[in-house]
C-alpha cells in the first residue's frame, strides 16, 4: 500500500482476489442458500425417519445388527430412539427452530453414519440394506452411501455458523415480539 | 466496479435480537406434538395386516402345535441357509409346542424367483422340506450358476421327487401366482429382509442364535397359557 496525499488506495494486485473471496463469502452466506441447506438436510432426515417409523422397529434393529458395530444390548434402544431423533432434528432444522442445535445434532449423526460406513468398508461386510430409508433406499453400495452422507454433512456445516435463518420460525418469533 | 464495496450480509453482521424463550418453547412443544401425531397416524396406516389363509404353506413340526412360527425366506439368501440348523434346534427344543411354516420371499436376482417356484413344485409333490434342505445346503453350488436347473433336478431326484413333473411345474402359471400371493403376504406383514420370523405377535428378523428364538417363543407360549 502507498500513501498518496493522506488517502488510502487499494493495491490493485490484491484487490481482485480479495473481491473474489468476498463474493464467494457473500454467496456462501446468502440467506437463501441456508434455506436450501435446511430444506435438503431437514427434508432428507424427515423422510429417512418416516421410512423407519412406519415399519416395525425390529426391521431397523436388523439393519443396525448388520453393521456389527455396537454391542447386542444397544441394538434395540438404537433402533427405537434413532428414528425419533432423526425426525425431530430434521423437522426443527427444516422449520428453523433451534436451528443451530438441530443442525449440530444432524452433523453429529452424519459423522456417526460416515464412521459406520467406513467400518463396513473396512470389515468388508455385505449389507442387505443400510436401513437408512428402509427398503426404499435407492443407494445400495456402501461407497454410494458414504458419498451421500458426506454431501449432507457438507450441506449441514454452513448452518452451524449462522445466527439467524431466513424464513424460519425463529425469525417469526422475533417478528412477533 | 472492482472497488465497489459489497453489501454486508445483515444476518452475519447484525447481532440477532433476543427472542422470547417462552415463544420458542411454545413453538417447539407444538412441533413435537404435531410430529408425534404424524408418526402415530403413519404407524396406524402401516400396521401389519393379517396373514390370511396359511393352510397351503408347508409346515415342519407337529401340525397341531399351538404356536406357529412363520419363516419368510429365500433359497438364494445366504443368511437363510445359515439359520436352518437354528430352526431345527428350535423344533427339537419345543416338541409338540411349535411348528414352522415356510413363506417364499424371493429377493434379488431372477434365479431367486425360479428357485422359489421349484420349492412350490417340490411342495406339490410332498417333498418340500427334503428339497429345501438340499437347496440351502448346496446354495453356494448353484446360486451363481447361470443355468442351475440341472443341479436342481439332481437335488429333486435325491429328495425323491419326479424330475419330469418338476421341470413341467416350473412353467406353471398357478405357481407364479402363488409366489405373488406370498410376496403380498410379506408386504402386508411389512417384511423387508430375509430371513424374518413371525412368532405370535413378535417378529425376529435375521436371528443370531437359538436364544433369540427361545426368548420370543417362551414369551408367546406364556401369553397363550395366560390367554
Image (cartoon, coloured by chain):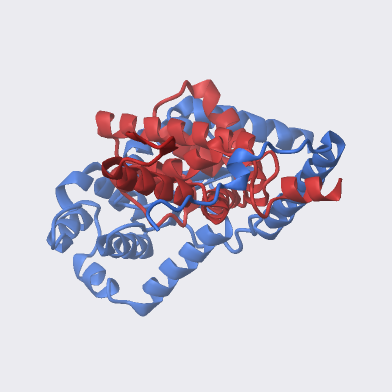
- The residue positioned 24% from the left and 75% from the top of the image is B168
The C terminus of chain B lies in quadrant: top right
Percent x, y for residue B208? 43, 30
Q: Which sits in the foreground, B187 or A81?
A: A81
In the rendered view, tell whether residue A57 sits above or below residue A116.
Answer: below
How many numbered circles are shown? 0
- x and y, in percent, of residue A156 in the image: 50, 42
Q: A122 and A168: which one is in front?
A: A168
Looking at the image, can residue B187 be seen?
yes
Residue A128 seen anywhere in this rendered image of the structure: no
| Chain letter corresponding to the colour blue | B
Farthest bottom residue?
B173
| Residue B182: image location, x then y, percent | 47, 63
Asked if residue B122 lies left or right of residue B148, the reply is right
In screen coordinates, is A47 left or right of A23? Answer: right
Decide which of B133, A156 is in the foreground and name it.
A156
Q: Residue A123 occupies which quadrant of the picture?
A: top left
**Chain appearing in red on the rendered image:** A
Residue A70 falls left or right of residue A168: left
Q: Is residue A150 left or right of residue A173?
A: left
Q: Position of residue B225 (x, y in %)?
A: 74, 34
Q: Quadrant of the N terminus of chain B?
A: bottom left
Up the image or down, B43 lies above or below B201; here it is below
Amino acid at each position: 500500500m502507498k500513501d498518496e496525499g493522506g488517502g488510502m488506495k487499494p493495491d490493485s494486485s490484491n484487490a481482485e482476489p480479495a473481491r473474489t473471496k468476498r463474493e464467494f463469502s457473500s454467496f456462501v452466506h446468502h440467506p437463501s442458500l441456508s434455506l436450501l441447506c435446511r430444506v435438503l438436510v431437514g427434508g432428507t432426515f424427515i423422510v429417512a425417519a418416516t421410512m423407519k417409523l412406519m415399519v416395525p422397529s425390529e426391521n431397523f434393529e436388523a439393519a443396525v445388527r448388520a453393521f456389527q458395530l455396537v454391542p447386542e444390548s444397544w441394538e434395540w434402544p438404537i433402533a427405537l430412539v434413532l428414528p425419533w431423533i432423526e425426525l425431530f432434528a430434521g423437522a426443527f432444522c427444516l422449520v428453523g427452530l433451534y436451528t443451530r442445535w438441530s443442525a449440530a445434532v444432524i452433523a453429529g449423526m452424519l459423522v456417526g453414519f460416515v464412521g459406520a460406513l467406513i467400518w463396513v468398508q473396512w470389515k468388508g461386510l455385505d449389507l442387505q440394506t443400510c436401513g437408512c430409508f428402509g427398503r426404499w433406499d435407492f443407494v445400495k453400495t456402501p461407497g454410494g452411501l458414504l458419498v451421500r452422507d458426506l454431501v449432507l454433512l457438507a450441506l449441514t456445516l454452513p448452518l452451524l455458523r449462522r445466527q439467524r435463518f431466513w424464513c424460519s420460525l425463529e425469525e417469526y418469533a422475533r417478528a412477533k415480539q | 466496479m472492482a472497488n465497489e464495496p459489497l453489501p454486508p450480509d445483515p444476518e452475519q453482521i447484525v447481532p440477532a435480537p433476543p427472542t422470547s424463550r417462552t415463544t420458542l418453547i411454545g413453538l417447539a412443544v407444538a412441533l413435537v406434538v404435531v410430529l408425534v401425531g404424524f408418526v402415530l397416524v403413519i404407524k396406524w396406516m402401516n400396521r401389519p395386516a393379517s396373514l390370511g389363509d396359511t393352510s397351503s404353506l408347508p409346515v415342519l413340526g407337529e401340525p397341531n402345535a399351538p404356536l406357529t412360527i412363520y419363516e419368510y425366506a429365500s433359497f438364494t439368501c445366504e443368511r437363510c441357509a445359515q439359520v436352518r440348523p437354528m430352526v431345527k434346534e428350535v423344533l427339537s427344543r419345543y416338541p409338540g409346542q411349535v411348528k414352522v411354516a415356510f413363506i417364499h420371499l424371493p429377493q434379488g436376482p431372477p434365479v431367486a424367483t425360479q428357485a422359489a417356484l421349484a420349492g412350490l413344485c417340490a411342495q406339490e409333490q410332498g417333498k418340500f422340506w427334503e428339497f429345501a434342505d438340499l437347496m440351502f445346503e448346496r446354495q453356494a453350488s448353484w446360486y451363481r450358476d447361470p443355468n442351475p436347473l440341472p443341479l436342481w433336478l439332481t437335488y429333486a431326484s435325491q429328495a425323491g421327487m419326479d424330475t419330469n413333473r418338476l421341470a413341467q411345474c416350473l412353467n406353471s402359471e398357478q405357481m407364479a401366482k402363488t409366489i405373488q400371493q406370498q410376496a403380498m403376504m410379506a408386504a402386508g406383514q411389512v417384511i423387508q429382509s430375509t430371513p424374518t420370523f413371525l412368532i405370535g405377535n413378535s417378529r425376529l428378523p435375521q436371528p443370531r442364535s437359538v436364544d433369540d428364538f427361545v426368548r420370543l417363543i417362551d414369551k408367546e407360549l406364556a401369553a397363550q397359557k395366560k390367554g
